[in-house]
């Protein structure tokens, strides 16, 4: 197999959760363009189907399915549906996230618990459900979409002159936990040739960002900008592919140098 062929996902089956979100759209497109039979799943089936239909018009194999990461029976139903349709799974991209803490550090404890139910317990449930499927087949790749906020503390200075803030305790908690859960999962499934790695993206620029935030955040990076709608495509395809066959348990920042500065 040539080195370029090792980066291909042709003949593989992939699931990307949360495929209609900021990161999700480019992740679904990336694995589909790389050749995978691609499934994407979330609660918002209408939004997912819009993404999937657009990619199918480009000749890509993308199917949208519904599931709720807060509900283990829903996760198991999703697993069974994909196995029935495709026979197996080769790559799981854990991208779903819930952000119920709208009041930040001052929010109710119940909101923190609701976040953990999806972002921690739910992450464990879906990883186990599909990790076991891959372990049975003897190969696979799990890619957790984390955040640089799982590696560092919040920097209030990047929000100066805006109404934004970085005081999201649940987000820092579960993204930090994801880093070590990645190591655990890599160890647990390693003997069965299933790899697990974590991608830690930096800030993703949107039209809603005020100019002071864009300037101050960009100044914190080596590359002088926030992430765009293509910046995660390469790393996720790489980690899902045979080109990354000896990489597991790693957390890779994709942040323009934010965490290295």
Image (cartoon, rainbow, N blue to C red):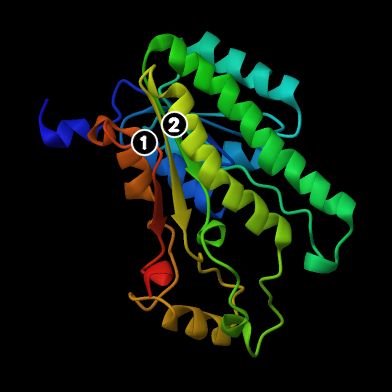
Circle number at residue 186: 2
- Asked whether the beta carbons under mark 2 and mark 1 sit within 8 Å of each other, the answer is yes
Looking at the picture, tell me which residue is in the foreground, 166 or 24.
166
Camera sees residue 53: no
Looking at the picture, tell me which residue is in the foreground, 184 or 140.
184
Question: Is residue 36 positioned above or below 156 on the image?
Answer: above
| Residue at 67% from the left image edge and 43% from the top image edge | 119
Looking at the picture, tell me which residue is in the foreground, 210 or 221.
221
Question: Is residue 47 positioned above or below 168 on the image?
Answer: above
Q: In which quarter of the image is the N terminus?
A: top left
Q: In which quarter of the image is residue 44?
A: top right
Q: What element carries label 2?
A: helix
Q: Where is residue 117 in the image (x, y as percent from the top left)?
A: 76, 39
| Residue at 65% from the left image edge and 90% from the top image edge | 161
Q: In which quarter of the image is residue 78?
A: top right
| Residue at 50% from the left image edge and 64% from the top image edge | 204
Badge 2 density bin: few <14, some 14–19, many ≥20, Cα 10 Å: many
254 left or right of 79?
Answer: left
| Number of numbered tags placed on the structure image | 2
Q: Where is residue 135 in the image (x, y as percent from the top left)?
A: 45, 15
60 left or right of 215?
Answer: left
Residue bearing mark 1: 248
Q: Position of residue 212 (x, y in %)?
A: 56, 87
Q: Earlier in the sequence, mark 2 or mark 1?
A: 2
Between marks 2 and 1, how big is the CA–CA gap? 6 Å
């Amino acid at each position: 197999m040539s080195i370029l062929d090792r980066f291909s996902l042709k003949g593989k089956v992939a699931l990307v959760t949360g495929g209609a979100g900021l990161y999700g759209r480019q992740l679904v497109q990336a694995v589909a363009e790389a050749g995978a039979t691609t499934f994407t799943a979330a609660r918002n089936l209408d939004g997912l189907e819009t993404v999937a239909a657009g990619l199918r018009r480009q000749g890509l194999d993308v199917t949208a399915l519904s599931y709720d990461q807060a509900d283990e029976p829903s996760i198991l139903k999703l697993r069974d549906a994909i196995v029935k349709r495709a026979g197996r799974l080769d790559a799981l991209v854990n991208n779903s996230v819930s952000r119920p803490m709208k009041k930040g550090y001052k929010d109710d404890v119940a909101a923190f618990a609701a976040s953990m139910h999806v972002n921690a317990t739910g992450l464990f449930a879906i990883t186990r459900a599909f990790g076991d499927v891959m372990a049975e087949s003897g190969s696979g790749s799990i890619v957790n979409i984390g955040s640089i906020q799982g590696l560092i503390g919040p920097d209030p200075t990047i929000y100066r002159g805006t109404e934004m803030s970085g005081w999201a305790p649940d987000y820092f908690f579960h993204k930090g936990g994801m880093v070590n859960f990645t190591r655990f999962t890599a160890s647990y499934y390693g003997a069965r040739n299933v790899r697990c790695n974590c991608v830690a993206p930096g800030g993703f620029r949107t039209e809603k960002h005020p100019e002071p935030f864009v300037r101050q955040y960009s100044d914190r990076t080596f590359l002088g900008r926030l992430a765009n709608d293509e910046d995660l495509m390469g790393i996720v395809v790489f980690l899902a592919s045979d080109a990354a066959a000896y990489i597991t348990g790693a957390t890779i920042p994709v942040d323009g140098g934010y965490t290295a500065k």
